[in-house]
Amino acid sequence: MVPKFAQLFVSTLLLLTPLLSIADGRDIGVCYGLNGDNLPPPNEVINLYKRCQIDNIRIYQPYPEVLEALRGSGISVTIGPRNEDIASFATSQDAANDWVNTNIVPYADDIVFRWITIGNEVIPGPLGSNVPAAMNNIRNALDSAGITLAKVTTVLPGTALAASYPPSAGAFGSDITETMTGIAAILAQEDTPLLINVYPYFAYASDPSHISAQYAMFTSTAPVVIDGSFQYFNLFDAMVDAFNAALEKINFGNVKVAVAETGWSTVGNEPYTSVANAQTYNRNLLNHVTQNGTPRRPDYIMPTFFFEMFNEDLKGNVVEQNFGFFYPSMQPVYPFW
């Protein structure tokens, strides 16, 4: 039987561990997807995160076996429901309560839940209008359960912006402005960031005649885009600041953004995909986001999740299957961590 004071001490350490990593300026995580038929067991995966000193993990739905493996790990967890469940949360507080009581409450003493992502890239789209109400109901459920550290947010793709060039022109589409205003109001109340997926790889690979490899991979030594008083040496900052500008246009410039996914594939679309390009992008990104803000938010060190831990062979195409830092054997695709 563990004395109560010892239990309290361990719980306090669990809560402090991710906060310490945030305080030292390295707020970095890696996404853990399970779209593979040859992936290692979750307990081995979580041990790999710990060996690599990765303090934050993002998972895409509440897999019980992953949550069990995360107990007591000290790793901060970002998690969300399945997209198809969002509409029920928007219309039913009971449904939101059930989800929290099933997937968060049983683990809350042993896991630090950081962000609950209500919707992964559902805006724009038919489910998008449900997100503000679903966020509110999940937040109510968390409050009722006494879970105060976990905050609700959502994850947007680049297509949520109707305009993004130059970055100061960034604006949400007129069809989602009302939804985004509702979401931003919740985020502002909670001092929680809007999560965005940012992929310079796809922009570069789709338009290499206008986007240089240097601009995409943080190796440009001169500004490529000059936007008023802001100079952009890399595409990542430009893509992020387009979202910052869009938030300003709906009068929520005080809402920060964080990166829910970014990465570079190693195979499937040569010469744009390669081990060398992925290693260059991810290494330069890591150095950048742990030391610098964007031109529009220079003093804000932005939380960032890399995509992703493993190559996943059940993804839709070869490029998508090869964003991983590790093979399913847990051997590294290239030296990084």
Image (cartoon, rainbow, N blue to C red):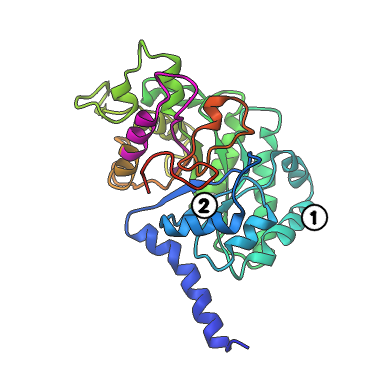
Counting residues from the start of the chain, the first of labels 1 and 2 encountered is: 2
Mark 2 residue crowding within 10 angstroms, few (<14) / some (14–19) / many (20+): many
Residue 23 is situated, as x and y percent measured from the top left of the image, at 35, 60
Front residue of this view, candidates 50 and 300:
50
The local secondary structure at tag 1 comes to helix
Q: Which residues are magenta?
A: 256-283
The local secondary structure at tag 2 comes to strand
Dot 1 corresponds to which residue? 94
Dot 2 corresponds to which residue? 57
Vertical placement of residue 231 versus 98, above or below: above
> Is residue 209 left or right of 261 when viewed as pictured?
left
Q: Nearer the viewer, mark 1 or mark 2?
A: 2
Q: Residue at x 52, y 54 (%)?
A: 190
Figure quadrant of residue 212:
top left
Residue 183 is situated, as x and y percent measured from the top left of the image, at 58, 41
Q: Tell me if I can see residue 115 in this picture.
A: no
Kind of residue at badge 1: Asp
Marks 1/2: CA–CA distance: 28 Å
Q: Residue furthest top?
A: 209
